[in-house]
Image: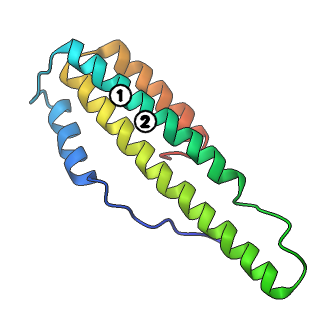
Amino acid sequence: MTIEAPKLDYGQAEIGAFLEGARNGQFNFDPNAVTQMVGVYDSLLAVLTTVRERVKEVTDAKGFGGFQSAQELQTGFGGKATEGVAVIDQLIVGVLDLQEAYLRSAQKIAEIDELSQKRIRLAAEGIGA
């Protein structure tokens, strides 16, 4: 069974416009302020990643019993958990986009490269792929 993730509007259009502007050099932020902002987003990523792992653990929950209704409940519960993971993945991608936009606005090339590596690692886990 394939679960389609609900689409969450967390400001993707605005984040996309900010990222595009940063890529085009329209913004120029103080590097120290950007370092602090990226740190805030790193903390948010840590929380989202932890929550994602906890929710992912229950996508294949067991122990609901053998009755048909219990099996349906188990399937529904697992489906909701899978949807939750997909929504968290959307938020993680948004945070990564914000980090990139800020880093680009301060021309922090080494950090942008590190972020690209992080995106690759997360894509290997199915996040943002």
Q: Residues within 10 Å of mark 1 (few under 14, many from 20)?
A: few
Position in image of residue 79 (x %, y %): 64, 69
Q: Residue furthest bottom?
A: 68
- Which quadrant of the figure has residue 98? top left
Determine whether the residue tagged by mark 1 lies in a helix, strand or loop.
Answer: helix
Q: Look at label 2 and name its amino acid.
A: Leu
Tell me the colour scheme of the image. rainbow
Query: Do the CB atoms of the residues marked 2 and 1 lie less than 8 Å apart?
Result: yes
Q: Residue furthest right?
A: 66
Q: Which residue shows up at 33% across the image and 38% down it?
A: 97
As drawn, is 105 to the left or to the right of 65? left
Position in image of residue 23 (x %, y %): 20, 31
As drawn, is 16 to the left or to the right of 62? left
Position in image of residue 95 (x %, y %): 37, 39
- Which quadrant of the figure has residue 64? bottom right
Q: Which residue shows up at 69% across the image and 60% down it?
A: 59
Give the residue number, with chain letter if any, for mark 2: 44
Vertical arrangement, residue 81 with respect to residue 111, above or below: below
Q: Residues within 10 Å of mark 2 (few under 14, many from 20)?
A: some
Q: Look at label 1 and name its amino acid.
A: Val
Determine whether the residue tagged by mark 2 lies in a helix, strand or loop.
Answer: helix
Q: Which residue shows up at 25% across the image and 32% down it?
A: 101
As drawn, is 92 to the left or to the right of 9? right
**Total numbered labels placed on residues in the image:** 2
User: In the picture, which quadrant includes the N terminus?
Assistant: bottom right
Which residue is nearer to you in this view: 50 or 1?
50
Residue 26: numbered disc: none
Give the Cα distance between marks 2 and 1: 6 Å
Q: Which residue shows up at 83% across the image and 87% down it?
A: 68
Give the residue number, with chain letter if any, for mark 1: 40
Vertical arrangement, residue 111 with respect to residue 53, above or below: above
